[in-house]
Amino acid sequence: HHHNDKVVLLIHGYTSNPEETRNLGNYLYEQGFDVFGVRMTGHGTTPQELQCTTWHKWYVSVHEAYSELRSRYAKVYLFGVSMGAMSALKLAEESTPNGIVCAGAFLMPTSRWVSFAHFIYPISRIFGSDGIYFDVPIPKQRQHITYIRNPLTSTMQLIDYGKDVRGCLNRITSPIL
């Protein structure tokens, strides 16, 4: 049940899960907002499950949550972390949320591993459906929030997702922080 007409949809980042936004959710709730944390397909389960998904499926999870909240609240705000911020931007291009907050939107991959990923991806396909995973140095206190193994195919999906979202930025009219 909700106590008002405004809700914030909290969207976690790549390889992460809704636990990542829990503290913020509690804070926003104390400030008088209803909050809803979405879990994207392939996230919050296993890296193997993530490997079997595409960015389109990640986005569908967010879109469905948004549509549900839209039907129940007068005002829907989006808060996204990293890839979650990209999802918020893509949603804002297709509809008009009342406002968006983007924390570290992953739009332009700059780090070296991305060029490395482009180089190694064609090679990795030789190894079949098991694919290649690389270990990510996640601190102990965050290991319940995010995967410590990252599927290469999913990283390629992340890069493609960024390209897609970059193409729609000029069509967003919602206020953005």
Image (cartoon, rainbow, N blue to C red):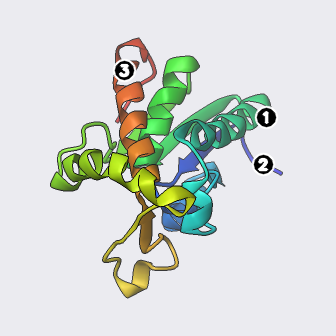
How many numbered marks are there? 3
Q: Is residue 93 left or right of residue 101?
A: right
Q: Residue furthest right?
A: 1
Q: Is residue 98 visible?
A: no
Q: Secondary structure at mark 1?
A: helix
Q: Earlier in the sequence, mark 3 or mark 2?
A: 2
The amino acid at mark 1 is Arg
Number of the front mark, 1 or 3:
3
With respect to residue 85, does 140 lie above or below?
A: below
Q: Which mark is residue 72?
A: 1
Whether the residues at callouts 3 and 2 have beta carbons within 8 Å, the answer is: no
Q: Is residue 50 visible?
A: yes
Q: Residue furthest bottom?
A: 140
Q: Give the Cα separation between the discs numbered 1 and 2.
A: 9 Å
Q: Earlier in the sequence, mark 1 or mark 2?
A: 2
Q: Nearer the viewer, residue 173 or 121?
A: 121
Number of the front mark, 1 or 2:
1
Q: Secondary structure at mark 3?
A: helix
Picture residue at 47% right of the left edge, 71% below the top: 147
Question: In the rendered image, which residue does mark 2 sit on?
Answer: 2
With respect to residue 75, does 167 lie above or below?
A: above
With respect to residue 64, does 51 lie above or below?
A: below
Whether the residues at callouts 1 and 2 have beta carbons within 8 Å, the answer is: yes
The quarter of the picture where the C terminus appears is top left
Position of residue 84 measured from the top left corner of the image (x, y, whole percent): 47, 46
Q: Which mark is residue 169?
A: 3
